[in-house]
Amino acid sequence: MMSTTNQATDAPEQPRTTGIYVYGIVPADVRTEDDAVGVDDSQVSTIRHGDIAALVSEISVDRPLGKPADLQAHAHLLDGAARVAPVLPLRFGAVLTDTDALKDELLTAHADEFAAAMEQLEGKAQYVVKARYVEHAVLWDVIGENEQASALRDTIRDQPEAATRDARMALGEIVANAIVAKREEDTATVVEALDSLADLVNVREPTHEEDAAQVAVLVEVARGDELEQAVGALAERWEGRVEMRLLGPLAAYHFVMAQTPEG
């Protein structure tokens, strides 16, 4: 007869039901607040290794990721941490099997890389300047600057849409091309205005056809007020033509990204 010990040894291993979701890397002395939550409202904690730590939470291995709320929770946690400490973000969806895998495959394997990135980020955060053309204003700018556009506008005025289809298409193409040219010029103006404040500048691709500029900058958090003043000066200069927004401080998504572990 088998003993109780052998029966336990021979029992099939139970499948793992949870994994470790990893948000990013922070200095080892960072402490999470009791109310810090991540994906699925899970409690967030830190797992430390030497001078660095991973921001993590437990997640069901059967839970699919990718809902807008998941992305928002990931970014919200990292952006909140970036307000108080340097944060090296991981790409959304990084899950490892357990704490041992996290330490071996991520923290130990990339310790030097993470330490160097953390030094680069010390005291800094990402800010994003978004500028979008006021629709009627940019349209009238193009019409005022382009004789062909002005003529097409006169052709279209007070005419049925079906009768002026070709003219409308031609005008739309002129406006779109003009906005591309204006965007290049206005993006350069934004970069020039922020260059003296930023350690690094990253010009982003437009996400909307009427975007005037989208520029990410890595700036010392202590200079946040100066950055607001610089963006405010541009907003005043472009009032009625361009609407300006300043987002941040944020995690430095557009400047450094931690190696994504294979779970």
Image: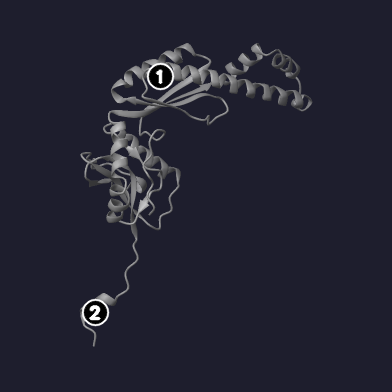
Give the amino acid at mark 2. Asn
75, 87: nearer the viewer: 87
- Across and down, in percent, residue 39 comes to 36, 46
- Across and down, in percent, residue 187 comes to 50, 21
The residue furthest right is 163
**Which residue was labeled with disc 1?**
195
In the picture provided, is 68 more to the left or to the right than 55?
right
Disc 2 secondary structure class: helix
Q: Tell me, what colour scheme is on the image?
A: one colour
In the picture provided, is 50 more to the left or to the right than 233?
left
Badge 1 local density, few (<14 within 10 Å), some, or many (20+)? few
**Image disc number at residue 6:** 2
In this picture, is 118 found above or below 45? above
In the picture provided, is 81 more to the left or to the right than 217?
left
The residue furthest front is 112
Quarter of the image with the N terminus is bottom left
Quarter of the image with the C terminus is bottom left
In this picture, is 170 found above or below 258? above
**Image disc number at residue 16:** none
- Across and down, in percent, residue 210 comes to 56, 25
167, 99: nearer the viewer: 99
Disc 1 secondary structure class: loop
For image coordinates 21% across by 78% down, the residue present is 5
| Inter-mark Cα distance, 1 to 2 | 70 Å
